[in-house]
Amino acid sequence: MKLHDTNSKHRPAFAQRPIATAATCLLISIASLGLSACGGGGGSDSSVVTPVPVPEPVKLIAPPTKAAALTQSGEAAQDSVKATTAAAADLVRRSNDPSSVFLPFGELMGGRQTSPKPSSADSDRRKILAETVSCSSLGITTIRNCTGSIVMDTNVISTANSLPAGSFISIRFDKIAGLIDGQSFTLDGSMRIDFLTAISNLDHPGNNIKLQLGFDKFVGTGGGESFGPVTAIALLEVDALGQSSLTMNGVQYFELSQVSGSDSSNFSLGRSKLRAAHWSDSKSYVDYQFSNWQNSNGRPVQGSSATLMAGQDKAWITVESSSSSQVSYRVQLSSGGAAKNYQVLASYSGSTVSYSVKTL
């Protein structure tokens, strides 16, 4: 269950910021500690857990559920190109956004066996239930010189080795500061993990899993970088085939691990995909599927391609030529069994882009 595949030849679009490394390590350590509270006792447990109603910082915003309609006009061809380049940029931003502290939680379940663990000296701390502890007493060996306190809560009994739907782990950081791998960091604010589907075996959770993750006024620093305050909520899903997606702020992202590159003007999208509202109809969605889409010096590279899908309607977009001053796209719009082809030219003058369309 991984949103970032560490064995893939693709890498995140940007080198992770220092704070991302420190924050991620601490969060996964403590969340793993919280899961130990659920599975530390061994044996099976069939007790019914009643979810505790805890206010969420914000509500999850998902994409629309109704497919959009793609018309076959020249204007639609131009709009498809604009929307596609914007979607590519959105994937890159999400890969590098500070709120991407959400992403490693895809590894929290699938990689529990290798997640940082508390030291054996503090095994009693695994039995967390509405408990306030000092950072230094957690016994997480990856953290040094840790100060501040953490309030942890869960509604799962300490002897359970499974998680019923409705289980949660809630963590509040109060002026945390310390070192991870020699790197100083600070954290403050709250996070919460809600398990929306049951997990029968914590060590081997399998697929068909949904986790809701919330951050409230979450702020941190590390290595001269800083982020936050982040107040956001995200949904992590793993389907029957083990494919992960992240839903956040009205957009659903797939294959974020396929984003690679050096900066926002130079990147590559393998088979990355996202679902978002149609550019002129906020109540319907469009899927953007990229196939080796590349940008160099702020321009899509020749041969880059993408497909827009909305129900039975499709738009195939291919970059036929590209230079610093002009990019030519071929767009085929398919609807109702018929197809129309267009050429869309994007002309650049400084920071200004103008478009023209020709029927083929």
Image (cartoon, helix red, strand yellow):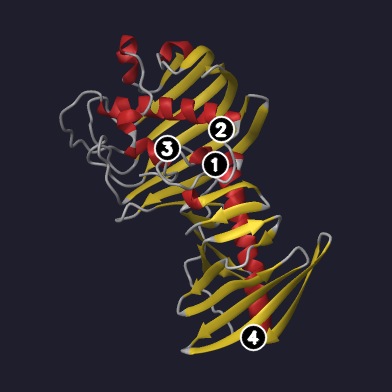
Gap in angstroms between the C-alphas marked 2 and 3: 18 Å
Circle 3: residue type:
Ile
Q: Residues within 10 Å of mark 1 (few under 14, many from 20)?
A: some
Select label 2 or label 3 by which is in front: 2
* Residue marked by disc 1: 100
- Residue visible at 66% across and 30% down in the picture: 226
Circle 4: residue type:
Ser
On residue 20, the disc is: 2
Pick whichever, 102 or 249, lies toward us.
102
Instruction: Identify the element where label 1 is drawn.
Output: helix
Gap in angstroms between the C-alphas marked 1 and 2: 8 Å
Instruction: Identify the element where label 4 is drawn.
Output: loop
- Residue visible at 51% across and 85% down in the picture: 335
Q: Is residue 168 above or below residue 124?
A: below
* Residue marked by disc 3: 193
Q: Earlier in the sequence, mark 3 or mark 4?
A: 4
Q: Residues within 10 Å of mark 2 (few under 14, many from 20)?
A: many
